[in-house]
């Protein structure tokens, strides 16, 4: 937080007023007149400073500029991530239900991982379109509806029924987020599985596999 002091103009105006009034009503031709006026103006400035003190103004620190990746599409993706995570955190602070709070915590963490993985692997962005355009915004819409109804503070068939449906749906949504993250690793898992298979075959051919005889490298 940045702070700066805004000087009160009252002491300056008061000191100046003393000189003007003295010059209009009293003589200014002797040294002691000048000294007396100076002392009185200083006293006026001191008193007015006490009555009208300087104001200390606190300004919030400026938002840090987002770091550009050099890829406008990924930059937009990171902005969307920050907005979604910020909204999840706000809703989590507002919604008091402990079960839903834990679910939001989990979805927030998973959402970060999904976005970060795609940012590191832009070729995966096409797999995320439905998540970005429907699943994520609809999740936030449901949570906002739950928050509004919960804040209404009344019971009723519409409110209780809708909140119950949202609570049940969030279990499915939480699992869906996990599956979305897992799906991003499908190609990598296949590549690793292929590498393992090839390596096992080569080790067996060289007699270095499990239970085989040692061969020459």
Image (cartoon, grey):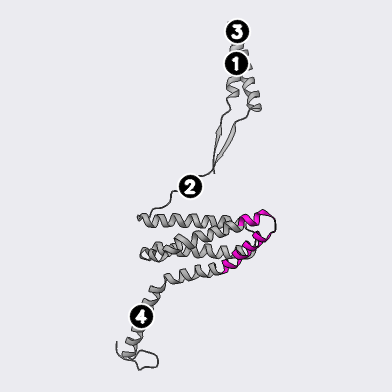
What secondary structure is the stretch in magenta mostly built from?
helix
Q: Which one is closest to the eye, mark 3 or mark 2?
A: 2
Q: Which residue is mark 3?
A: 24
Q: How many marks can you see?
A: 4
Q: Nearer the viewer, mark 3 or mark 4?
A: 4
Separation (CA) of disc 3 from disc 4: 100 Å
Q: Specify whether residue 153 is painted magenta.
A: yes
Find disc 1 in the rendering and name its residue.
17
**Measured Cα–Cα span from mark 2 to mark 4:** 46 Å
Return the disc, 3 or 4, that comes first in the chain's sequence: 3
Q: Which residues are magenta?
A: 147-171
Are the residues at dot 1 and dot 3 in contact (C-beta closer than 8 Å)? no
Between 174 and 24, the residue placed more toward the observer is 174
- Checking the image for residue 63, the label placed there is 2
Mark 1–mark 4 CB contact (< 8 Å): no
Q: Residues within 10 Å of mark 4 (few under 14, many from 20)?
A: few
Q: CA distance from mark 1 to mark 3?
A: 11 Å
Q: Position of residue 70 (x, y in %)?
A: 35, 54
Look at the numbered discs 1 and 2 and tell me whether their residues touch, using CB distance below 8 Å.
Answer: no
Q: Image quadrant for the N terminus?
A: top right
Q: Residue at x 57, y 37 (%)?
A: 57
- For residue 5, the mark is none
The reply to whether callout 3 and callout 4 are in contact (CB within 8 Å) is no
Q: Quadrant of residue 197?
A: bottom left
Q: Residues within 10 Å of mark 2 (few under 14, many from 20)?
A: few
**Toward the viewer: 104 or 44?**
104
Q: What residue is shown with label 4?
A: 194
Q: CA distance from mark 1 to mark 4?
A: 90 Å
* Residue 14 vertical placement versus 98 (above, below): above
* Mark nearer the viewer, 1 or 4: 4
Q: Is residue 128 within the magenta segment?
A: no
């Amino acid at each position: 937080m940045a702070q700066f002091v805004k000087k009160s103009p009252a002491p300056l105006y008061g000191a100046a007023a003393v000189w003007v009034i003295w010059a209009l009503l009293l003589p200014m031709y002797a040294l002691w007149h000048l000294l007396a006026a100076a002392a009185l103006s200083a006293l006026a400035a001191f008193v007015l400073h006490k009555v009208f003190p300087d104001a200390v103004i606190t300004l919030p620190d400026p938002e840090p500029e987002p770091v550009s990746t050099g890829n406008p599409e990924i930059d937009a993706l990171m902005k969307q991530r920050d907005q979604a995570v910020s909204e999840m955190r706000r809703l989590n602070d507002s919604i008091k239900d402990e079960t839903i709070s834990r679910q939001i915590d989990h979805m927030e963490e998973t959402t970060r991982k999904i976005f970060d993985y795609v940012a590191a692997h832009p070729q995966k962005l096409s797999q995320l379109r439905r998540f970005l355009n429907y699943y994520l915004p609809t999740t936030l819409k449901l949570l906002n509806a739950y928050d509004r109804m919960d804040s209404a503070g009344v019971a009723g068939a519409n409110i209780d029924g809708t909140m119950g449906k949202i609570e049940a749906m969030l279990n499915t949504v939480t699992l869906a987020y996990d599956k979305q993250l897992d799906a991003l690793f499908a190609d990598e898992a296949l590549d690793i599985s292929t590498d393992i298979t090839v390596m096992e075959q080569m080790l067996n051919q060289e007699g270095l596999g499990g239970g085989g005889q040692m061969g020459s490298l």
